[in-house]
Image (cartoon, rainbow, N blue to C red):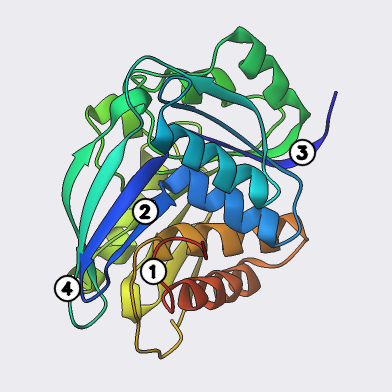
């Protein structure tokens, strides 16, 4: 069985960005994590769904993944169109999601063949999945560590439950930084083994068992924060897979997030 360092599962979309930045980019949490991890030198595969054969947006997603070294053998074509997200970026570079059409991602989950293939990964990361938590429930408790971004705009609470996750990734706005420790403790109480919370320019917080850690974000003037949180996740996971400590992984996350903030979208296209 092919050995992958990371398999990312879930959302993809076409980001239509306007405001201070005017661009159209391939994005989505799982795609951004997959591409950024491949660019960091990991062996990466992606599982998810795009529109049918001939759908231009679906072709664009597939091409962007493959061009950046991501294995797309498990990319599925569905009759629904490829997902689209409309984003506004203000003069400070901060992005706000205006509209999301989840398209082909809606209701998709890995079939038995894809689930079996996950046994060949060192780590599995879940992005946006509208499957009532079914994929997470089938993965947790196995031999492969599993993380998920639970700060996505889920359609149901079950989609972002945390029980059994090796790492629950989340984000809080800077105005809620004082809630971070209680939020992380609640994630562990609900069944996550660890919690990592990004706080924008206020840095990040991690809770692994009884140990807590904080890290500072790099001081930058962002062009576009779209995908910055996904890049933080990637930097963190890539460092951990290389044997880094939690603090070093947090710093790696901030470094990659800062780099992403200097161009439109979640990765250079």
Is disc 4 placed on a helix, strand or loop?
Answer: helix
**Image x and y of residue 138, in percent:** 54, 17
Image height of 229 relative to 43, above or below: below
Question: Taking the image as drawn, is residue 126 in sight?
Answer: no
Packing grade of label 2 (10 A; few <14, some 14-19, many >=20) is many
Label of residue 4 in the image: 3
Q: Would you say 225 lies left or right of 154 here?
A: right
Residue contact between numbered discs 4 and 2, judged by CB atoms under 8 Å: no
Name the residue tied to disc 1.
264
**Image x and y of residue 107, in percent:** 34, 18
Badge 4 or badge 3: first in the primary sequence:
3
Separation of marks 4 and 3 at Cα, in angstroms: 38 Å
Q: Nearer the viewer, mark 3 or mark 1?
A: 1
Badge 4 or badge 2: first in the primary sequence:
2
Residue contact between numbered discs 4 and 1, judged by CB atoms under 8 Å: no
Name the residue tied to disc 2.
170
Image height of 194 relative to 256, above or below: above
Image height of 50 relative to 16, above or below: above
Is disc 3 placed on a helix, strand or loop?
Answer: strand
**Image x and y of residue 226, in percent:** 35, 63
Separation of marks 1 and 2 at Cα, in angstroms: 22 Å
Q: Would you say 108 lies left or right of 252 here?
A: left
What residue appears at the point 43 percent right and 19 percent down from the top-left corner?
A: 52
């Amino acid at each position: 069985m092919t050995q992958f360092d990371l398999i990312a599962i879930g959302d993809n979309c076409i980001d239509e960005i306007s405001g201070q930045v005017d661009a159209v980019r391939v994005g989505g949490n799982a795609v951004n994590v997959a591409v950024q991890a491949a660019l960091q030198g990991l062996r990466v595969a992606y599982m998810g769904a795009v529109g049918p054969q001939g759908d231009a947006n679906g072709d664009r997603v597939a091409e962007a993944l493959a061009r950046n070294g991501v294995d797309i053998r498990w990319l599925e074509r569905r009759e629904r169109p490829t997902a689209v997200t409309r984003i506004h970026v203000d003069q400070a570079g901060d992005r706000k999601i205006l509209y999301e059409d989840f398209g082909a991602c809606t209701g998709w989950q890995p079939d038995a063949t894809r689930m079996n293939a996950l046994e060949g990964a060192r780590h599995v990361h879940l992005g946006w999945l509208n499957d009532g938590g079914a994929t997470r429930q089938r993965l947790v408790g196995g031999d492969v560590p599993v993380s998920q971004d639970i700060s996505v705009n889920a359609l149901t609470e079950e989609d972002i439950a945390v029980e059994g996750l090796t790492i629950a990734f989340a984000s809080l706005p800077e105005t809620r930084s004082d809630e971070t420790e209680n939020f992380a403790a609640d994630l562990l109480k609900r069944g996550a083994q660890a919690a990592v919370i990004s706080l924008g320019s206020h840095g990040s917080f991690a809770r692994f068992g009884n140990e807590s850690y904080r890290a500072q974000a790099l001081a930058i003037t962002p062009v576009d924060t779209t995908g910055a949180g996904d890049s933080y996740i990637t930097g963190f996971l890539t460092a951990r897979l290389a044997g880094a400590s939690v603090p070093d992984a947090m710093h790696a996350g901030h470094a990659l997030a800062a780099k992403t903030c200097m161009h439109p979208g979640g990765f250079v296209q």
